[in-house]
Image: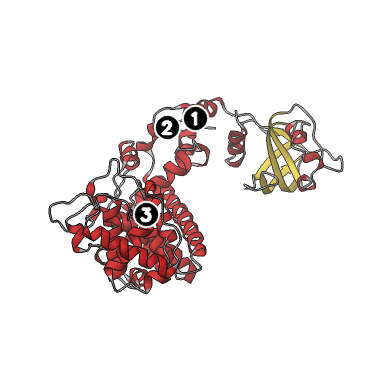
Amino acid sequence: MTEQLLHYLWRHKIYPLAPLATTAGQAVEVIDPGLPNRNAGPDFFNAKLKIDGTLWVGNVEVHLRASDWMRHGHHTDRAYDNVVLHVVAEADADVARTDGRPVPQLVLPCPPEVVRRYDELARSEVMPPCHAILPALPRLTVHSWLSALQAERFGQKAEAIRHRLQQCGGYWEDAFFITLARNFGFGLNGDAFEAWAGRLPFRAVDKHRDNLFQVEAFFLGMAGLLEEDDPGADDYCLRLQREWRYLQHKFQLPAPLPAGQWRFLRLRPAGFPHVRLAQLAWLYHTQCSLFSRVMEAETADELRRLLQASTSEYWKEHYTFRKASPPKEKKLGKGALDLIVINTVVPFLYAYGQHKADETLCERATRLLESLRAEDNYVTRMWDGAGIPVQTAADSQALLQLQKSYCDKRDCLRCRFGYEYLKAGKAW
């Protein structure tokens, strides 16, 4: 038994079939267990209980052992004076408020079947640990939990965007481009791309936005990829180096990102940082007011057209400065574009809709996710194999949230699927 499990039993009213009573023999009837409190203070607020026939409205504190009340200093903390019931697994001490008045205590045993299933979830090496009951879950249960997870993911991403917006001094266009750049890293180089974009002097770049060569010099120079002592530098690289030195001096630019930040191992040549930076330079050069245009787009096809980046002529024949390649236009595939829409456009639509109090933007974000195919990765394949259908990007985003925020942390007690597993086949 853990304190987390005891919280769970109280919150979900998983009580013994026999009548409840305090350690002093007073009958207890739980009308409402209260609202969970994840901050400082008692564990549950505004519980409604009848103790020995008298209605009490107040807070509830939960501990494994009654003596934890003193160990945690609650007997000297006035914030706990309005606790009307102390729920414990073991009553090894009497407890009192700061004025000495005793606090009623209830020993809440855990059904053996729940303990067994909880241990299974905690110790299982198979992922997801609740896989046995997933195929039999009602569709409504699955749909409602995935919808809640999607909303939770929207909220977290919107908060990250608001933080990035604050760092950008309130410029939505800058915050959007930094997020777009991060997602051009496609996981492996995501952190490096975000760090790089965060160093870009956007107002300086804007002054040269109509010149693709100068935008490339800004981007590749700030990325630390215009090495001065590169013995393999060709004529184009040398020209970019000279342009970068001029721009760096003109705008008194900060030091570029260390070149060692970029990762090449296990990357296909089309995904090399040089190519991705050239694509971003082309987008920045050709798509002025990109953020505004993206916010106005109604469909995934419109967004794919807006975000379809090409490159300058040089990069159609190169993957790096040292390596030429057969002539080929280096564009993002449909799958890559959809990932950009899912991870950049959709969260920004939602965050911007919240900022503007415009529900239509938030609804469009949801519609876009539902119109796109599910992402194909080990998480979505795992859940699909376990019996949870993964059809749209809304499903895959919800399951990524489930995996990251619940399964990876073994936080099964806050998961709807975990709840279903604990109660499967057992009447309490």
Label 2 residue SS = loop
Residue 236 vertical placement versus 27 (above, below): below
Extreme-right residue of the structure: 99
Spot occupied by residue 322 in the image (x, y as percentages of width and height): 22, 50
Residue 28 in view: yes
Residue 54 in view: no
Mark on residue 176? none
The numbered mark, 3 or 2, whose residue comes first in the sequence reads 2
Label 1 – label 3 distance at C-alpha:
46 Å
Q: Residue at x 23, y 56 (%)?
A: 332
Which amino acid lies under the numbered mark 1 shown in the image of this protein? Ala
Q: Which residue is mark 3?
A: 224
Q: Are marks 2 and 1 in contact (CB under 8 Å)?
A: yes
Q: Which residue is mark 2?
A: 129
Label 2 – label 1 distance at C-alpha:
8 Å
Q: Nearer the viewer, residue 422 or 281?
A: 281
Within 10 angstroms of label 3, few (less than 14), some, or many (20 or more) residues? some
Q: Nearer the viewer, residue 161 or 240?
A: 240
The numbered mark, 2 or 1, whose residue comes first in the sequence reads 1
Within 10 angstroms of label 2, few (less than 14), some, or many (20 or more) residues? many
Label 1 residue SS = helix
